[in-house]
Amino acid sequence: MPHQSTAKKVAVVGAGAAGLVAARELRKEGHDVMVFERGTQLGGSWVYSSEVESDPLGLDPTRKIVESSLYASLRTNLPREVMGFRDFPFVPSGKPDRDSRRFPAHQEVLRYLEDFACEFGLNELICCQTEVTYVGLETDGKWMVKSRRIGGAEGCQVTGTYDAVVVCSGHYTEPRVADNIPGIDLWPGRQIHSHNYRTPGPYQDQVVVLIGLSVSALDISRDIAVSAKEVHITTRSEAAGKLGKFGKHPIYDNLWLHSMIEKAHEDGRVSFQDGSEVLANVILHCTGYKQHYPFLHTSGAVSVDDNRVGPLFKHVFPPALAPGLSFVGVPSFVVPFFLFELQSKWITGILSGRISLPSEEKMMEDIEAFYSKLEVEGVPKRYTHQIHDIKKLFVPFEYEDWLAAESGCPPPEEWRKNMFYGTIVRTLNQPATCLDEWVDEDLVLQAHQDFMQYLS
Ligand code: FAD
């Protein structure tokens, strides 16, 4: 607990999983926390909405943003034991109206986050329907945060000053589309980004070309295959190797895997680099999201370049603005909630004065060395924050171990690491059955033994 004099006034932007755990950690150490949330409730990505955006590709900057990218049938892609925060295990509640499956439906995750907020008294810290429009450093070293009440009078802004701002605004809202497809501008069909995919109904009897091979892409392709006439997944060939050979899917009669699109034609045909072509109605871009922080005004001290948010020391602190400005949740391909918890503990320790950061120069050196390593390894800039590599299964959790060691908490549990990788392997090898069939009962047992210390 910091001395009264070291307690800070901290603004947290966003009340998703990252913002909630950041608020919990900061408050635990006596900081004065205010959480700004532009949505009507906490939960971020996990607040499902059947509403879709007016621009199905999400390119129009004036469109009304729909926060969630969830589709109605979504079940978690990680088992609940792995997904939960360490000291608030995501175990079945035992209540009849709750989903007790290991890979529960999205509604159960939202209820888990609501339970978490309730358990730690976080609701009183959250200001919903309040969008942060400006975050900038003042000459006196304080942070100015401007916010506007959604639905309030036009032009009505509230300004506050804080010792620190923790950005937890997520990165699954601003679609990234495949815009380098030859002929796409004149292709007459419908295009949509997975951000605006909800249910398979609109794809009934349609021929759909789906770009991408992420977990959601695979999920959505199966969702659609039930009623669509044909689904054609197209992806870079090295990624396809994970799923099998190009050609017809072994289980679904109407699902094919192709190499990348070669050209979209004015008559509606879409041709692939493997020489095949289809007459398609829809192109569905499952091509990920952009990191986007329109409210940040840092005079270039932190910027986004091809999805690299930088410079950030250990994906959290911009050296020139540390420790006053920090980010929770920038990384991808991680165990999200658990990582947010570790990052939040580290940030809190630093703001409390328990943990020191290296000098600005040393942090910059570390970042430069990291960027050089990525370059030597041929990792594209857009994957700067991708922590684990799907091609290198069973690599250690180096980043998480480092954060835990810095924060003075135990490293990630062995069962969590093994369950994470085991799940990825099963997702790739048995995509249709992996949510209901598994072989890691021994790890589940270890997890539940660990949970005993947190469950009263
Ligand atoms: P978010 O949940 O996006 O929360 C950010 C919050 O910030 C939002 O509530 C938003 O309204 C708010 N906000 C943004 N800008 C502002 C502003 N200017 N002012 C005020 N508030 C603002 N993870 C898993 O662990 N398991 C899964 O199975 C899984 N499946 C997923 C499936 C899909 C389709 C997607 C898109 C993601 C999935 N994830 C999954 C990842 C998931 O997003 C993370 O687990 C996690 O919920 C992200 O939390 P966050 O707090 O970083 O961001």
Image (cartoon, rainbow, N blue to C red):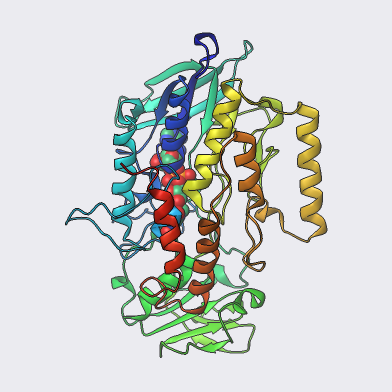
The quadrant in which the C terminus is found is top left
Q: Is residue 429 visible?
A: yes
Along the line of sight, which residue is nearer the eye, 186 or 352? Answer: 352
Position of residue 269 relative to residue 45, above or below, is below
Along the line of sight, which residue is nearer the eye, 141 or 28? Answer: 28
Q: Residue at x 33, y 32 (%)?
A: 128
Position of residue 308 relative to residue 393, above or below, is above
Q: Is residue 62 visible?
A: no
Along the line of sight, which residue is nearer the eye, 378 or 446? Answer: 446
* In the image: residue 374, left or right of residue 8: right
Query: Within the image, what quadrant is residue 24 found in?
Result: top left
* In the image: residue 212, left or right of residue 154: right
Q: In the rendered picture of this protein, how many numbered marks are placed on residues?
A: 0
* In the image: residue 399, left or right of residue 452: right
Query: Within the image, what quadrant is residue 148 found in?
Result: top left
Spot occupied by residue 125 in the image (x, y as percentages of width and height): 35, 26
Spot occupied by residue 346 in the image (x, y as percentages of width and height): 58, 33
Along the line of sight, which residue is nearer the eye, 441 or 104? Answer: 441
* In the image: residue 167, left or right of residue 379: left
Q: Residue at x 41, y 24 (%)?
A: 34
Spot occupied by residue 262 in the image (x, y as percentages of width and height): 63, 79
Query: Within the image, what quadrant is residue 62 found in?
Result: top left
Q: Residue at x 28, y 48 (%)?
A: 111
Spot occupied by residue 174 in the image (x, y as percentages of width and height): 49, 50
